[in-house]
Image (tube, rainbow, N blue to C red):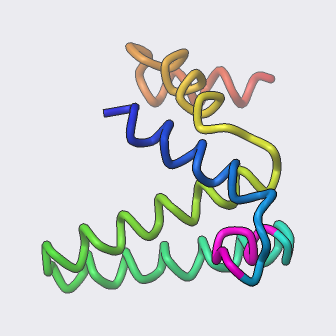
Amino acid sequence: MNKILERLDLTIQRKTTESPNKSHTAKLLKKGTEKCAEKFGEEAIELIVASVKKKKKEIIGEAADTLYHMFVLLRSKNISINEVLSELASREGISGIEEKRKRNLE
């Protein structure tokens, strides 16, 4: 399943060199991290609203939009999905309570 995430990340990375006139991704990235964060936030709110309404098809679509915009936001900071996946892997098997406690000690 990670392969689709990696392909999306590579596509977004490739779009960084394309013309903003031909690529929505390039247009967002050209506007900077603030705009990318704003779009991610909008999509996250749309996912929340869809989830409250409990319409499965809408939830799935909004979740996909949210993931895409999260990837664009990460790329605006030159962070790859593999870096995020590595962080998740490092937390695997650790309870959320324990993981949060460790972060608070740092």
Magenta stretch holds residue 94? no
Residue 11 in the image: above or below residue 106: below
Residue 33 in the image: above or below residue 85: below
Residues rendered magenta in the picture: 22-29
Location of the C terminus (image quadrant): top right
**What's the residue at 45%, 41% (across, down)?**
5
Residue 89 in the image: above or below residue 2: above
Main secondary structure of the magenta stretch: helix
The one nearer the camera, 46 or 5, is 5
**What's the residue at 38%, 13% (across, down)?**
93
Give the quarter of the image for residue 57: bottom left
Q: Position of residue 19 (x, y in %)?
A: 79, 72
Give the quarter of the image for residue 33: bottom right
The one nearer the camera, 35 or 49, is 35
Give the quarter of the image for residue 71: bottom right
Classify residue 43 as left or right of residue 11. left
Magenta stretch holds residue 28? yes
Classify residue 60 as left or right of residue 18. left
Q: Position of residue 76 (x, y in %)?
A: 79, 57
The one nearer the camera, 101 or 26, is 26
**What's the residue at 51%, 27% (across, down)?**
88
**What's the residue at 67%, 38% (across, down)?**
80
Q: Position of residue 96 (x, y in %)?
A: 45, 30
Location of the N terminus (image quadrant): top left
Classify residue 15 as left or right of residue 87. right
Residue 90 in the image: above or below residue 12: above
Mark count: 0
